[in-house]
Image (cartoon, rainbow, N blue to C red):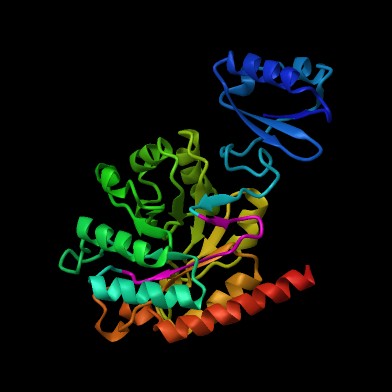
Amino acid sequence: MIIIVKQNTKEERIRDLIAWIESQNLRTHVSSGDYTTIIGVIGDTSKLDEELISGLDIVEGVKRVSEPFKSSNRKFHPQDSVISVGDQKIGAGHFAMIAGPCSVESREQIISVAKSVKAAGATMLRGGAFKPRTSPYDFQGLKADGIELLLEAKRETGLPIVTEIMNANHLPLFEDVDVIQVGARNMQNFELLKELGRIRKPVLLKRGLANTLKELLMSAEYVMAGGNENVILCERGVRTFETTTRNTLDLSAVPALHELTHLPVVVDPSHATGVARYVKPMALAATACGADGLIIEVHNDPPHALCDGAQSLRPEQFEDVARCVFQIRQTVQQLG
């Protein structure tokens, strides 16, 4: 249920209404704009008398929300959310360029890449410490040592770091990580999502290989229902019958998600295509269709990368992509 409060209503009256709603064992989400205040009511709202609430002198209107996702629903929060990551922001016009290697392999590698991507315009550093791999025989990441190397790269460059979590038991290792990534394989790991809801650290949630947008938003709801509203959504391609690319990048997800939710949406053209030469055109297309950011794999020696070298850009290639992305953004902003 959404309750639209009349303009210029005193804060005390709004607080009284919220207190009464929450006394019914319901939760509220308040969105205050320049001209209106919206109270989103979360829970079994069947016990609320819609006519009674509509008759209150401070209420302009009441609407029922049929979608199962509430906290992430744009109807509850008409303005775009802005997620702060250190000194960086993402959403509502703030664009994130997240770049770095698929896997952290050594101190020299991660610091070299970090310095290169920062010089090219990256605003955050990505790097895998725990790596989910299809084969149990493939490189699984440096784990805790990888996080320490990421933190060292952060100290060297000042870039906030983004890295993937595999298990809720690993959360103590992520205390100094700026953004916790939930990979496609864990999008519906609901126990992990519940644990991430108990912290206030930004969560980058990737769409699953065969999941709908509403399923993605329901996964975001698990995090937000726990009280953590710092969720960033990521489109990284879905599995189809096509085999030319690693996955099929669903760029229609970007405007569709912006219509459904207030959360920022980033695109991962590296995992979507699996081919380095396709990353640039898909990154530019994602920027043009309104993505709030990109997450791109960059390696200083892709042929010898321990993970996903085929889709990784060299630093000079990333510099070219970043330059073109910023030009596209300027064009889109001029077109309005």
Q: From what the image shows, is residue 330 above or below residue 57?
A: below
**Image coords of residue 46 (percent x, y):** 63, 20
Report the front residue among 139 and 274: 139
Report the front residue among 189 and 204: 204
Q: From what the image shows, is residue 38 above or below residue 216?
A: above
- Name the residue rendered at 27%, 58% in the picture: 147
The magenta segment is 87-102
Q: From what the image shows, is residue 61 above or below residue 80?
A: above
**Image coords of residue 209 (percent x, y):** 41, 60
- Name the residue rendered at 70%, 44% in the picture: 78
Q: Quadrant of residue 307?
A: bottom left
Residue 139 within the segment the image draws in magenta: no
Residue 188 appears in the rendering: yes
**Image coords of residue 18 (percent x, y):** 65, 20
Which image quarter is the N terminus in? top right
Counting labels gives 0
Q: Residue furthest left?
A: 137
Residue 99 within the segment the image draws in magenta: yes
Q: Residue furthest front?
A: 156
**Image coords of residue 195 (percent x, y):** 36, 38
Which image quarter is the C terminus in? bottom right
Residue 130 appears in the rendering: no
Q: Is residue 54 left or right of residue 186?
A: right
- Name the residue rendered at 81%, 16% in the picture: 56
Q: Is residue 213 left or right of residue 188?
A: right
Q: Quadrant of residue 240?
A: bottom left
Q: Quadrant of residue 27?
A: top right
